[in-house]
Amino acid sequence: MLTLFMETMGPFSNKMVRRHLLSYERLQLPPHFTEGRGCDYRFKKQEVDRVTGNPVLRIVPITLENSGKSGKSISHLLLKSRSENDERSEVLKFADLLNRCLALDPGRRMKVEETLKQDFIVSSSNSNGKRGKVMSG
C-alpha cells in the first residue's frame, strides 16, 4: 500500500520518515523504512517473487525517480478508468478532491470546511439528482 501511495502521491518527506522510525522504535515494531547515509532513507519494499512465490524484501531509495514519476497520478488513473457517462471535468474535480484529502503534509491536507466548498462537492449538490446529493449536518 505504501508503494502505491508513493507512486501516485510522491515520496514521503524525510521528516515524516524520521517520525515513523522513532514511533516504530518506541512501539518495538519493524519499520517500513531504513536509514542510509546521512539523511538518505530507503523503503523496505516487500514483494512476492514471481518464480518461487517466496516473499522478497527489497531496499529501495526514496527519490522522485522511484516514486511519483510512474505516470500513475490519481487524475491519470481516474481519467483512464472513467466510463463514457463520466464528464472529464467532473473526474478532474474528483481527482483534485482526492489529491487534497490524501496529502501527506497535514498543513496541505484539506480541512472539513474547505472540503464542503470544493468544486466536486458543490457541483454534486447542485446537479439535481445526477449524482448523490451531499447531506449537511
Image (cartoon, helix red, strand yellow):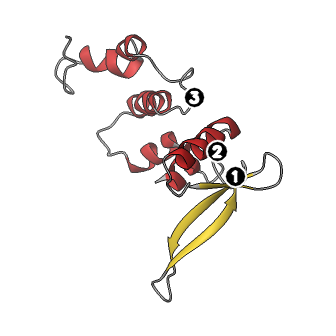
**Residue found farthest to the left:** 129
Calculate the distance from the C-alpha at mark 2 to the C-alpha at mark 1: 6 Å
> Callout 3, which amino acid?
Asp
- Residue at coordinates 36% horizontally, 33% vertically from top-left? 87
* In the depicted structure, whether residue 43 falls above or below residue 98: below
The amino acid sitting under disc 2 is: Pro
Marks 2,1: beta carbons within 8 A: yes
Reading the chain from its start, which is encountered first: label 3 or label 2? 2
Q: Secondary structure at mark 3?
A: loop
Report the residue that reaches farthest toward the bottom.
52
Tell me residue 73's x, y (percent).
55, 44
Determine which residue is flagged by label 3: 105
Which residue is under mark 1?
Answer: 62
The answer to whether residue 86 of the structure is visible from this angle is: yes
Question: In the image, what residue occupies the spot 34% across and 14% down?
Answer: 116
Q: Nearest the camera: 116 or 75?
A: 116
Q: Position of residue 65 (x, y in %)?
A: 73, 53
Which type of secondary structure does the marked residue at label 1 adopt?
loop
**Residue underneath mark 2:** 11
